[in-house]
Amino acid sequence: MQFTEEVNWSVFDFIIGGALLFLVGLALNVAWITIQKKEHRIILCLVILFLFVLIWAELAVGIFNSRFAGS
């Protein structure tokens, strides 16, 4: 919004983005502290990051809705 008029985020969008980042950071921290085996810890953290990217992409551009919109 600072560089172009094409981006039009509301306050709600910033709240959702901040909450998502906070929850992902919290989940990564809890997983890193509670999981004992290094391999399991890394796999769980990668799964959390993958889900974060998937949710972020869905909220940003709607990757699932646009694919099935014609059905």
Image (tube, grey):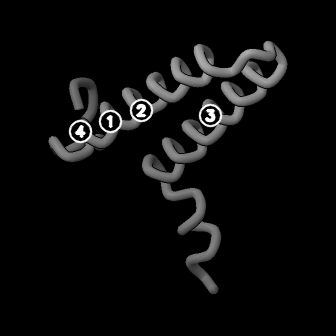
Which amino acid type is shown beneath numbered disc 4? Ile
Which residue is situated farthest in the left direction here? 11
Residue 12 falls left or right of residue 25: left
Cα separation between marks 1 and 3? 15 Å
- Name the element at disc 3: helix
Residue position for label 1: 19
Mark 2 lies on residue: 23
Q: Do the residues labelled 4 and 1 touch (CB within 8 Å)?
A: yes
Residue 4 lies in quadrant: top left
Residue 64 in which image quadrant: bottom right
Q: Residue 48 carries which label?
A: 3
The residue indicated by pointer 4 is 15
User: The disc labelled 3 sits on which kind of residue?
Assistant: Ile
Q: Which of marks 4 and 2 is nearer the N terminus?
A: 4
Residue 10: image location, x then y, percent: 18, 45
Disc on the earlier residue, 1 or 3? 1
Residue type marked 2: Leu
Q: Can residue 8 be seen in this view?
A: no
Which residue is rendered at x = 40% and y = 29% of the image?
21
Q: Of discs 3 and 4, which sits in the foreground?
A: 3
Point out residue 40 in the picture as x, y percentages from the top left corner.
Answer: 79, 24
For the residue labelled by badge 2, is the local secondary structure a helix, a strand or a loop? Answer: helix
Q: Which of the two discs, 3 and 2, labels the residue nearer the N terminus?
A: 2
Q: Quadrant of residue 50?
A: top right
